[in-house]
Image (cartoon, grey):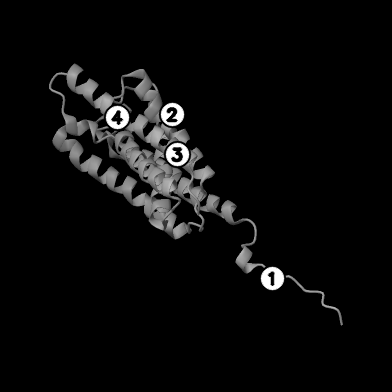
């Protein structure tokens, strides 16, 4: 595999942009909100998924620069793509008119719109050389599940929930359960779609599997 410096620079640029957006929003909150609780900021799925995206792009950029693509990195990129797509879809459908700790306009655009788009483009441009199995892709669901458990356990103690659809104080745990199942279904479908997309990379027969050419030797 040859080095792809253009792809590496693309990844470095957006990894830096994403990190700058997250750090900039955190600094803004600390300075502008009295008695701000930093742990709340890091308890947003948006923030956590963007950190994962930053790491995935930065590491993938380094390996692209060297012309390498280890299997664990391909799986990390797939997970980051799924998390960021969930972030973009959830924000667009449920949270676009609600304050979710991203009051700075350009930061809001970067974290909720730009980065989900970038991760999808990066995935499609550089699909894994080997297919991702459905079983492998389903392991990506572990993080959203752990996030849900963490949010619901921490909520009563902190008297704070990151998103309205995770807050049982308004409409009870039944509504939380319904919304959680719907988002889980979206995440499941995305995991399957991302895994199936890796078949595009291998649509044609691999050179090693092609039958050897027939030689027409004179009799």
Residue matched to label 4: 22
Picture quadrant of residue 21: top left
Crowd class of label 1 (few under 14; some 14 to 19; many from 20; radius 10 Å): few
Element assignment for label 3 = helix
153 relative to 113, above or below: below
- Residue at the spot of label 1: 211
CA gap, disc 4 and disc 1: 52 Å
Q: Choose the circle earlier in sequence order: 1 or 2.
A: 2
Q: Which residue is under mark 3?
A: 119
Judging from the image, what secondary structure is the residue with disc 2 in? Answer: helix
Compare marks 3 and 2 and give the one earlier in the sequence. 2
23 left or right of 106? left
Q: Which quarter shows the C terminus? A: bottom right
Q: Considering depth in this image, is 20 or 132 the residue closer to the camera?
A: 20
Inter-mark Cα distance, 3 to 4: 16 Å
Q: Nearer the viewer, residue 104 or 160?
A: 104
Q: Which residue is mark 2?
A: 113
Marks 1, 2: nearer the viewer: 1
């Amino acid at each position: 595999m040859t080095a792809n410096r253009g792809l590496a620079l693309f990844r470095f640029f957006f990894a830096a942009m994403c990190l700058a957006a997250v750090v900039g929003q955190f600094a803004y909150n600390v300075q502008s909100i009295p008695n701000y609780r930093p742990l709340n900021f890091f308890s947003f799925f948006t923030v956590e998924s963007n950190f994962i995206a930053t790491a995935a792009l930065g590491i993938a950029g380094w390996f692209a620069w060297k012309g390498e693509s280890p299997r664990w990195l391909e799986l990390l990129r797939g997970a980051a793509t799924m998390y960021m797509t969930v972030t973009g879809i959830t924000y667009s459908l449920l949270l676009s008119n609600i304050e979710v700790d991203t009051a700075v306009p350009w930061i809001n655009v970067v974290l909720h719109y730009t980065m989900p788009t970038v991760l999808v483009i990066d995935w499609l441009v550089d699909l894994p050389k080997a297919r991702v199995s459905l079983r492998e892709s389903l392991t990506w669901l572990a993080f959203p599940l752990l996030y849900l458990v963490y949010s619901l356990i921490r909520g009563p103690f902190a008297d704070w929930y990151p998103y309205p659809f995770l807050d049982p104080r308004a409409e009870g745990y039944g509504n939380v359960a319904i919304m959680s199942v719907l988002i889980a279904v979206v995440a499941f479908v995305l995991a399957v779609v991302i895994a199936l997309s890796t078949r595009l990379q291998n649509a044609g027969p691999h050179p090693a599997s092609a039958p050897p050419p027939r030689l027409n030797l004179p009799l």
